[in-house]
Amino acid sequence: MKIHCANMFTLLIHIFHPESWQDIFLPRLKALDRFAPRLLVNLWNNQKDVAPLVQLIRSDFPDAAIILTPNQGRDVGGKLALIDLYLKTKMESDYLVLLHDKKSPHTFEGKEWREKLFRIIDENIVPRILSEFKNNPDTGIIGAAELIRNEYDGNKFTTINNDKLKELIRLYDLKLTDHRFVAGTMFWVRTSVIQSFFSRFSPLLCREMLEEGNFTDHLEGKYTHSWERLFCWLATSQGFLLQGI
Amino acid sequence: MLINRWLLVDHIGQVRSKSERICLQAGPSFNDLPEVIRIVQQLPAGHFSVMMPGEPPHEKADRYIEMLLTLFFHPGYAVANYMPIIFTTANTTPSALMGSLESKARKQGFAGLSVRTVYPGEDQLPDGAFSLRVDRSKPDLAGMIAAWTKFSLSTEAAQEINLLVATTAEDGDALCSKLGNEVERLSGTDRYEVAARLYEQQCAISRYREELKRMANKERDNEYYLGVQMQERSKGMEWYHREYEVLPLWYKRFGHIIKVIMGKRSFRSLFTDDHKKDKV
C-alpha cells in the first residue's frame, strides 16, 4: 500500500563507491517506495563511471536530483552540498535523512557498522521513527541507538578531534548540554533544525573548511570527522533531543 | 565536440529545447535559481554553462558566487578536466569577481575554472581564442577550423570551438539551425576530419592523464588504508597479549577445561595440537 504523504521526508544520499548504488541503496530504497520519499544524491565527480551511474539512478528514480562534487570532506562534504541544494531549491519536507555508502575500507567492522546504521531506513522501522517525531515535538534527531556515542568527559572530548571540535563549537556558537552524537553520520533530522542553522552559516561555507581526498582521523584530528559529531549538535544546541532507535 | 553551439539566454524561461547547449547570461542578480536548477537537472551532461556578468552583482558577492558554485555541481554543467567552464566577455567581466569565484571554486575542491573568453562575431579572434558570439551572419567556420588546427598542433591544451548564438539575435533559432547545417556540411571535409581527430586525441590524452591521477590516488588510498588496518591489527594483538597471554599457564589450562565443560571445545582436542580446537 502506498502511503500518500507528499514531502514527508527527503533522503540525502552520498555515494563514493559506484557499485554501492545497486548493492546497498537500490533494494533499500525500493522498499521505501510506499512512503514516496524525495531523493537527492551526491556522487564523486571524478569517478570514472559517473555518467552511467547518473543514468542508472535516473532510470530507477526519474525524479531524483543528482549532483556531482569533488571529493572534499568525504561523506560530510557530500551531505553539505546536498543540504545546499535542498535549501537553494526551496524544497519542502518535514524531515531529512542523511545517508552514505559507508564502505569504510580501513576497518574490518565496516559492513557490520553499516548494517546497524541502515536500520533507520528499514521499511518496518520508518513508521516508528515518523511516529516518534509526530508524538514528541522535542525530538529533533533520530539515529541507530547502538551507535550513539558520548566522548565528552565534562572538560574535553576524549578524541583526537578535541581541538577542532572546540574550535567549531566556538565558531558556530553552539550551546551544548548534550554532547552525544550518532557515529557514522546517518540519521533523521527535523528539516527546521537544518534550515535554522544553515540560514546563519551557509552549507558551502562550512564545506570549505573540510579536508580533501580520502583520509581518516587515526593520526590527527580532522574538521570532517568533527562535523560528524557536530551534525547532531545542530539539533541538541537548538533544544531538541537526540533519540536512539 | 570540436564545435559546440550554445544558445545564449538571458533567463532560464527562454529555454525551449533540452537538446541545445544552454549558456545562461548570469545577470547581476539571480532570482530564479530554483527554476534554473530544475532545468539544469533535465539537461544532458555538459549542456549548461554560464556567461559571467559585465558588472558586479547587485547582491552580496559571496552570495552570488555561492549560487554559481551550486550550479557547478550539476551533471548538466559543462566541465573541462573536471573544471567548470565559465564564459566571459573580453574586458568586461569584473576581475575581482572572477578572482573570488576561482578561489571559492578551489575551496570546494575543484582544480580551478576553465574560462572561455567570448569575442564578438565581427572581431578578428586573437591567437588561441575560439569562442565567438554569433548575432547575425554566419562566421567563417572553415577559417576557424584551420586556425584551430594550426594552434592545436603547437599546444596540448587547445579549447574547443564555441559558437554562442544570442536569443536576442533577429532569429536565434534559425541562426542556430543554419550553423548546425554549416557544421554538418563541413564535417565531410578533410580539414574538419583532421581537426576532429586531433581534438579527439587531445581529449583522450586528458582522459588518460585523469585516469592515471585517479589510479595513483587509489594506490595511495590503498596503502593508507592498509596502514590503518595494520595498526588496528597490531592494537588487537597488543590487547590479546595484555589481557590473555600474560595469564599464568595453569589459569589458561583451567580456562580450556571450562570451554570443554561448556561444549565450546572437544575433550580430545585438549591432548592434541593438530585437531580443530574450537567448535564454532
Image (spheres, rainbow, N blue to C red):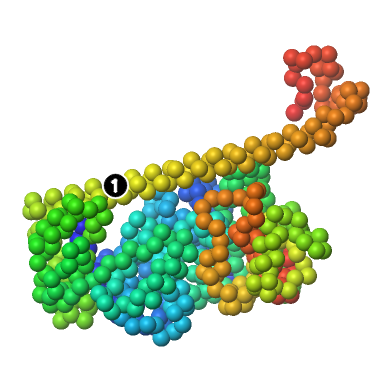
* Residue B256 image-quadrant placement: top right
Q: Which residue is drawn at 43% across and 56% down?
A: A45
Most foreground residue, A217 or A23: A217
- Residue B31, how many percent across, how many down? 41, 82
Q: Residue at x 53, y 40 (%)?
A: B222
Q: How crowded is mark 1: few (under 14 residues within 10 Å), some or many (20 or more)?
A: few
- Residue A29, how many percent across, how many down? 55, 56
* Residue B130 image-quadrant placement: bottom left
Q: Name the residue under label 1.
A: B205
- Residue A205, how many percent across, how many down? 53, 70
- Residue A147, how many percent across, how many down? 72, 54
| Residue B232 shown left or right of residue B45 in the figure | right
Q: In which quarter of the image is the C terminus of chain A?
A: bottom right
| Residue A155 shown left or right of residue B213 in the figure | right
Above-or-below relation of B149 to A112: below
Residue found at the very far bottom of the displayed protein: B58
Q: In which quarter of the image is the N terminus of chain A?
A: bottom right
Most foreground residue, A53 or A209: A209
